[in-house]
Structures are given as C-alpha cells and as structure tokens.
Image: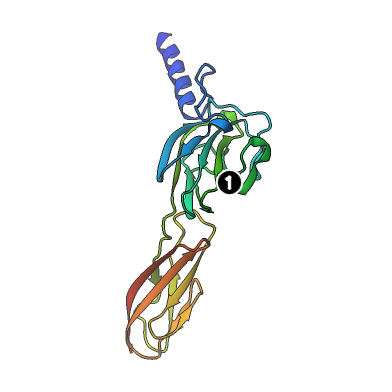
Amino acid sequence: MRSTALAAAALALLTTLTTGTAHADAPLPVNDSFANATPVTSLPFTEQADVRTATVEPGEAQGSCDAAPTRSIWYALTPAETASITLSDESRDYYHTLTVYTGSSLADLTEFAPCWWSYGRKRTFVLTEGTTYHVRVATSNDEYASASTVGFALAPPPFADFEVMTERPRANQPVSFYTLSWDQGGGEGTTVLWDFGDGTQTTEYRPEHVYTKPGLYRVTQTVTTTDGRTATVTKWLRVRR
C-alpha cells in the first residue's frame, strides 16, 4: 500500500515537472508582467523560462496565431544596431507561442510580425537600432504548459551545400544538381544562385546543366535568405568525354 502511494506521488510530481501546471503556491516569474519584462542587454542571451506559474494581465492581446493566452512572460530588447536576430523557444508545449511587439504599454502594442507556435522552432527578424521590441512567451493551454529555454542571438548564416545527382558526368549530357541549403535561423525561405564554372549561371533550385567540353569545373552555389544573409559553397566537378 505504501509503495503504491509513493509511486502515485512520484508520478504526480513527474507530470508537474514536465507538462502539467505547477503548484499554486509557486512564486510568479519575475517577468510575469509587461512592466517587468526581462531586459535582453547582450547577445547571445538564453534563459530557462517557465510559464506554468505565470499569469495574464488584463488587456493582454491575443496573438494572430493563437487562442487567448492563459499564461505569459515577457522580454524586452533594444538593439544597439540594426541586425537580423534569431528568437527561439525550446519548448515541448505545442501551445507555446512567441509574439514580437512594438509599443510602450499593453494598451498600444502592435504585433511586429506574425506570432508562431514555437515548439522548438526558430524565427529570424530584422530589428531596428534603437527600437524597443517586447517578446511575449505564452501558452493557451495550461494542461500542456511546460518549462523551456528562451534564446536571442545574432542570426547565423544559412547552411549551404549541394549534391551532384548525375554519376560520372559527361560532356554534352545533362548534369543534375540538388541543393541541400536551408536557413538555420528559421527563415521562411532562401534563394540560390548557381555558377557552373563555365560562364553560365541559374537560380533554379534543382537545375540541370550541359557542359559542352570535358574538363574540371568549379561549381559554386550562393544561398541568400529573405533578410540578406548569405553563404557560399564550392565544389570541383570533373566532366568526362
């Protein structure tokens, strides 16, 4: 009997620590309110965040991507220079959302960009020097609320790589290329520019190219994100007769 009771207590504690709502007597997070938003004074910045004991203030807006928040915490960032900054929330709560606002009070907040269901996903924004941005981490479902790691960092470059899909390429025959590139900052998309090393270029994602002469060609792919970050990869390609 005693072992059964202990097992039940342990299961209840595990549920609270992972997905459930924390004990009602737990203290509020220091950044529970908009006025007490945690200042992000340098990058990179990471913090263990927990909305399970947070509250929602009267007049707090609903984000464009979520139901009305039930718990939220706040961060404030004023960039020293205009830059692409990546926000992340490593949460296991599907109902976690991140929303970036401009404005000086709850009453005059404007959603800077569409909010997103974080669930471990990143987003990158170009934030302007001297403008204060308030970031809300929220949940709309107490049952699944969880602790998470919130992060702010200068956006990384995109990842650039490609494969040559054609085995033993030959002159005057199509050679297929395939991009493996993506935006490590969680951006919405990238563009690619291929330079095939023979004076021709294309912006197709999966191009085919015909080399008219055998030889060793320097193939370069340049990847660009929507906010202008770039990365380049170069590989040598031998084209046979």
Looking at the picture, how far across and down is residue 202, in whole percent? 49, 78
Specify the quadrant of the image occupied by residue 238.
bottom left
Is 125 located above or below residue 25 in the figure? below
- The quarter of the image holding the N terminus is top left
- Residue at mark 1: 116
Residue 45 locus on image (x, y percent): 41, 42
Q: Which is more toward the observer, 148 or 134?
A: 134
Q: Residue at x 40, y 87 (%)?
A: 211
Q: Identify the residue shown where x is 63% and y is 29%.
A: 57
Q: Exactly how many numbered labels are in the figure?
A: 1
The percent coordinates of residue 80 (x first, y second) are 46, 49
Residue drawn where x is 54% and y is 58% of the image:
188
**Identity, as a three-letter code, of the amino acid under mark 1:** Trp
Quadrant, the C terminus:
bottom left
Q: Is residue 143 left or right of residue 159?
A: right
Q: Position of residue 122 (x, y in %)?
A: 49, 49
Q: Name the element at disc 1.
A: strand
Depth check, front residue: 161 or 33: 33
Q: Is residue 108 left or right of residue 119?
A: right
Q: Residue at 47%, 50% (x, y): give it.
A: 86
Q: Is residue 86 above or below residue 21?
A: below
Q: Quadrant of residue 179?
A: bottom left
Q: Please tell me in which quadrant of the rendered image residue 6 appears.
A: top left
Q: Residues within 10 Å of mark 1 (few under 14, many from 20)?
A: some
Colouring style: rainbow
